[in-house]
Image: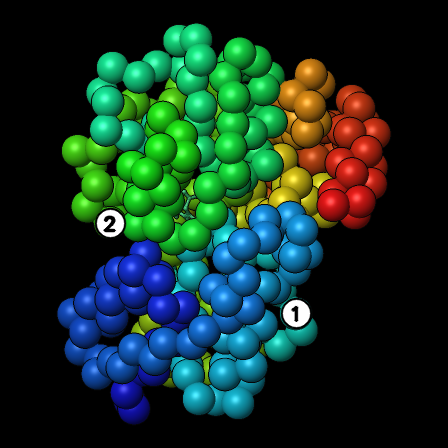
Amino acid sequence: MNKIRIGTRGSKLALWQAEHIADLLSKGGAETEIITIETKGDKILDVSIAKIGSKGVFTEEIEAELEKGNIDIAVHSAKDMQSELPDGFELIAFTEREVVNDALVGLDMKISLEQENLIIGTSSTRRVALLKHFYPHVKTVSVRGNLQTRIQKMKDGACDALLLAYAGVHRMGYDDMIISKLPLDKFIPAVGQGSIAIEASSNLSEEKKTFIRQNVNHDVTEKRLLCERAFLRTLQGGCSIPVFALADIHDETITVKGGIVNLEGDKIIRKRIMNKIEDGEQAGEELAEEVLAAGGEEILLDIREKLNQL
Ligand SMILES: NCc1[nH]cc(CCC(=O)O)c1CC(=O)O
């Protein structure tokens, strides 16, 4: 088999993830090369993603390279992947999921969301809306950029602490700045949080596809993520919409919890569905239908309108 060429964005987190995939493939006996690609999302740092229009800002340039065959696969944080890829592309593997929680990150280990006069840096609409819902006294400020930039902005006084995905903080080696893991009963994570996804062109050879799946894919994670992604697809969520879902597998059963919260944080809809593992995608779809029917549809329309006005 020829060398496997791995495309990735150039941030430290993206490179860590690409190197992790290269390691897994090398252990299986493949030769690998990492190729860095700059995307629109990397260039525009002063505007929130919700304003740029989320669709494909971090993936377009990478997909162009996949299409041309300049790279064999692209490595992404699974949660950054749209629920529906453009024609001709597919996700062929998901790495074993690590800690899924959001985490409070900062220098002062005594900080808690219960305290008064707290300013939290985050640019995720989901985290802002969930904070407004569960901790309405907490103020938020938008802090964008890669992890290192955000931490620097916090040190410069932009906020008291950051709200980030535990997984990314851990991958970057900042464990000693993790103040607490937020509880999953309040902060249900973004779809796919904590896993790394491999994207390929549908034209990638079966030989490479099979090899990559054998060495990278984690079966239980894949089932959980396909369920969550079916929820996101049915809801037509998109990464700027504050929706969340988390699937878990025990014995023969998949359980998925998820919902939507409005931007003001005063309306939240959460549901839970259980199904046989092999019907996980159906469980994700049903969860979305229930959330939509219970008022999620209205919230979604309202959010779309407000994001369009940004
Ligand atoms: N949206 C950016 C992004 N994409 C993936 C991660 C973290 C790693 C992961 O969840 O796999 C992060 C940072 C964050 O949300 O704090």
Query: Mark 2 is on which residue type?
Result: Met
Residue drawn where x is 47% and y is 47% of the image: 144
Question: Which residue occupies the foreground of this view, 287 or 81?
Answer: 81
Query: Mark 1 is on which residue type?
Result: Pro
Vertical side of 263 occupied by 64: above or below: below
Give the SS element for disc 2. loop
Q: Is residue 214 left or right of residue 258?
A: left
Q: Which image quarter holds the N terminus?
A: bottom left
Residue drawn where x is 24% and y is 22% of the image: 108
Give the SS element for disc 1. loop
Vertical side of 42 occupied by 232: above or below: above
- Residue 223 seen in render: no
Q: Percent position (x, y) of residue 233?
A: 67, 49
Q: How is the image coloured?
A: rainbow
Where residue 75 sits, quadrant-wise, is bottom left
Identify the mark at residue 22; answer none if there is no mark.
none
Question: Which residue occupies the foreground of this view, 49 or 282?
Answer: 49
Give the crowd class for mark 1: few <14, some 14-19, many >=20 residues within 10 Å.
few
Vertical side of 175 occupied by 34: above or below: below
Which is in the foreground here, disc 1 or disc 2?
2
Residue drawn where x is 74% and y is 45% of the image: 310
Number of numbered callouts drawn: 2
Q: Percent position (x, y) of residue 254?
A: 49, 33
Q: Is residue 132 left or right of residue 115?
A: right
The residue indicated by pointer 2 is 172
The residue indicated by pointer 1 is 86
Extreme residue toward the front, this view: 156
- Which circle's residue, 1 or 2, is located before the other in the chain? 1
Give the crowd class for mark 2: few <14, some 14-19, many >=20 residues within 10 Å.
some
